[in-house]
Image: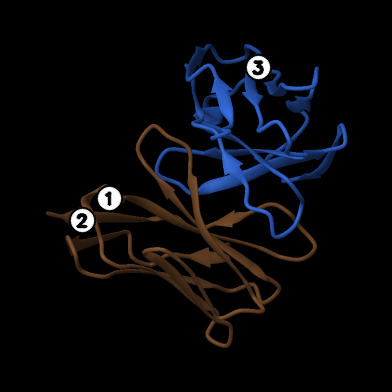
Amino acid sequence: EPEVTQTPSHQVTQMGQEVILRCVPISNHLYFYWYRQILGQKVEFLVSFYNNEISEKSEIFDDQFSVERPDGSNFTLKIRSTKLEDSAMYFCASSEGDRVNEQYFGPGTRLTVT
Amino acid sequence: DQQVKQNSPSLSVQEGRISILNCDYTNSMFDYFLWYKKYPAEGPTFLISISSIKDKNEDGRFTVFLNKSAKHLSLHIVPSQPGDSAVYFCAASDPGNTPLVFGKGTRLSVIA
């Protein structure tokens, strides 16, 4: 069964460093998303991406964040200068369409900023 | 700002019995609702969804009920199995936006 994959599973970085989180969405899906879950809190939307551009973003997704689809399969989230409060699980998701289409999530990357 | 609320952080049910997980929402614009299951160290797994034009959707042991007037939905699992033990998230979206808005989750423990 097709699934969303994410690498790495765990990333430890120092405050102020740049990190890139990688995702391979399901191959026939057209819409891609990043969510995050800070420990003990709910899953929060960061950004959605369609047709090689951001379609929506939350207020969490500020200038230190960027997304890219560098080739036909990968979808990346870059955090330019990490802060302690960026420590969270980051989930990538994809869906076939933009509405009434279930979003399928990857296993997540645990980002720890020290 | 909790647009999607799951007021029970945990629920314990005996194997074979019915599990009922509840979710309330405040945004009347929400028209699509989903339930996800999450095991530790894994991403949320899609379970079942319902559009606001329906009041019930069934898939095997899982049934979701939607009461629009009460802004309430519930997930019924019958019969409950030990493998159902996980955190269950309710999520919703509105016509103008694709992002899912999640509740905080309910941890279900099915006791053998």
Which chain's residue wears label 3?
A
Above or below, B84 relative to B14: above
Residue at the (53%, 65%) spot, across then down? B4
Which chain's residue wears label 1?
B
The residue labelled by disc 1 is: B85
Q: Amino acid at mark 3?
A: Ile
Q: Secondary structure at mark 1?
A: loop
Q: Amino acid at mark 2?
A: Val
Q: Mark 2 and mark 3: span between their CA atoms? A: 38 Å
Q: Amino acid at mark 1?
A: Ser
Q: Color of chain B here?
A: brown
Residue at the (78%, 30%) spot, across then down? A63
Q: Color of chain A here?
A: blue
Q: Mark number for residue B110?
A: 2
Measured as percent of width and height from the top left, residue A70 is found at: 80, 18
Measured as percent of width and height from the top left, residue B23 is found at: 45, 69
Q: Is residue A77 left or right of residue B63?
A: right
| Few, some or many residues within 10 Å of mark 1 (<14, 14–19, 20+) | some
Q: Mark number for residue A20?
A: 3
Count of numbered labels shown in the rendering? 3
Report if the CB atoms under discs 1 and 2 are less than 8 Å apart. Answer: yes
Measured as percent of width and height from the top left, residue B65 is found at: 48, 76
Residue at the (66%, 31%) spot, across then down? A25
